Image (tube, grey):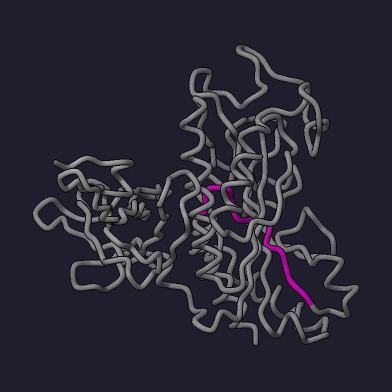
């Protein structure tokens, strides 16, 4: 006779009148990857159940999926490979794990949709802090939380870092998401309501560009999955609400050893000037429809122009005042990336341009 208790975790076998307990650990590994949709990739995931799983990345097997269903292969040769690159405990599942993957071709070379493979930062010299803005949307109304049907809430101004039910909408989601990220071991640094109604932001920091991208995608995954419980969804479009409302970005704070230690204003200027020569290269991976957000208004520089300055939130690149006060040692903030951009591709182009300045 065989019975089970919490069958995803234990199997218990009964022998006659005595009980022999045989523990077989069953772990749920949620394999997460980015599809091949253009211009904005989507997250995909599926669950793999493993017995006696160690919880270590090196014990996550390579898996495959149907690339013809994700615009990553043709139907007559549809298999693509999933290569695990990062693992985190899953705060929403018992004995579960979140596994971030790169997509490979059948010959194990990086798939053309694989932005992570383009990052030149094997020594983790580059540090990134991403500020992810987004709107929480109601599935039924297709409007941000706090927006009435057929109209608009009060103008923006009172929503930023607000408290109280009149101007604050969706805090329960935001707080639960923060707790989940912390439980998953993500280097989660903060949350705040943003300038527009129903708009929020969270911040992550990582030493190493690939890790920064991994953690941002896992944090997005947790946020998106959480909304399934509430009849909401997350809108990452950079300008979902037209008119006099702020758009959503993903400001990229970055540094390398040179910027963190040089103590030389001219080095920072050289890096910024290098960015000024590569506008199109950066904008091409900074998110679809970003022209609707980067207009020169609402704390942005126009998409086809470039500027930098100390404490200038209307510039393409802001030099934080802390960097100046520390004797020109610190970081830069590229304010152009949109909320729907791929952090892997953002990091890749920032690293390439920064290195070209030296």
Instruction: Give yes or no for residue 53 being in the magenta stretch.
Output: no
Nearest the camera: 221 or 108?
Answer: 221
Extreme left residue here? Answer: 76
Q: Is 187 rendered above or below residue 329? A: above
Q: Main SS type for the magenta part?
A: loop
Which image quarter is the N terminus in?
Answer: top left
Extreme right residue here? Answer: 325
**Position in image of residue 99 (x %, y %):** 39, 59
- Residue shown at 22%/40% (left/top)? 3
**Position in image of residue 223 (x %, y %):** 53, 42
Which image quarter is the C terminus in?
Answer: bottom right
Q: Is 160 rendered above or below residue 339? A: above
Quadrant of residue 243 within the rendered picture:
top right
**Position in image of residue 81 (x %, y %):** 24, 63
- Residue shown at 26%/66% (left/top)? 62
Residue 208 falls left or right of residue 152: left
Extreme front residue here? Answer: 17
Residue 229 falls left or right of residue 128: left
Q: Is 347 rendered above or below residue 177? A: below
- Residue shown at 60%/41% (left/top)? 134
What range is drawn magenta here?
Answer: 330-341
Instruction: Give yes or no for residue 332 being in the magenta stretch.
Output: yes
**Position in image of residue 53 (x %, y %):** 33, 63
Nearest the camera: 182 or 110?
Answer: 182
- Residue shown at 74%/72% (left/top)? 331
Residue 166 falls left or right of residue 221: right
Nearest the camera: 334 or 303?
Answer: 334
Residue 216 falls left or right of residue 3: right
């Amino acid at each position: 006779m065989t019975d089970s208790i919490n069958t995803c975790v234990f199997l218990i076998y009964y022998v006659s009148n005595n009980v022999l307990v045989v523990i077989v650990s069953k772990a749920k590994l949620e394999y997460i990857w980015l599809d091949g949709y253009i211009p904005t990739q989507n997250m995909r995931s599926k669950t793999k159940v493993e017995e006696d799983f160690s919880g270590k990345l090196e014990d996550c097997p390579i898996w495959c999926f149907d690339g013809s269903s994700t615009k990553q292969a043709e139907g007559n040769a549809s298999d693509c490979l999933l290569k695990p690159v990062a693992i985190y405990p899953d705060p929403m599942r018992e004995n579960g794990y979140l596994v971030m993957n790169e997509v490979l071709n059948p010959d194990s070379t990086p798939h053309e949709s694989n932005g992570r493979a383009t990052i030149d930062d094997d020594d983790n010299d580059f540090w990134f802090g991403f500020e992810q803005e987004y709107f929480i949307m109601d599935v039924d109304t297709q409007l941000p939380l706090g927006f009435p049907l057929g109209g608009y809430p009060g103008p923006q101004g009172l929503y930023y870092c607000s408290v109280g039910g009149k101007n604050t909408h969706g805090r329960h989601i935001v707080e639960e998401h923060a707790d989940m990220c912390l439980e998953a071991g993500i280097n989660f640094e903060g949350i705040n309501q943003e300038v527009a109604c129903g708009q929020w932001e969270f911040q992550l920091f990582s030493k190493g560009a690939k890790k920064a991208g991994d953690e941002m995608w896992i944090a997005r995954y947790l946020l998106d999955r959480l909304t399934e419980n509430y009849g909401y969804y997350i809108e990452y479009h950079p300008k979902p609400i037209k008119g006099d409302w702020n758009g959503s970005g993903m400001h990229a704070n970055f540094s390398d050893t040179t910027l963190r230690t040089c103590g030389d204003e001219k080095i920072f200027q050289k890096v910024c000037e290098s960015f000024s020569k590569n506008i199109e290269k950066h904008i091409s991976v900074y998110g679809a429809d970003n022209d609707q957000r980067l207009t020169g208004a609402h704390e942005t520089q126009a998409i086809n122009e470039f500027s930098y300055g100390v404490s200038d939130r209307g510039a393409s690149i802001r030099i934080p005042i802390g960097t100046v006060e520390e004797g020109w040692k610190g970081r830069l903030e590229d304010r152009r990336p949109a909320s729907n951009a791929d952090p892997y591709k953002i990091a890749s182009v920032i690293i390439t341009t920064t290195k070209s300045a030296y």
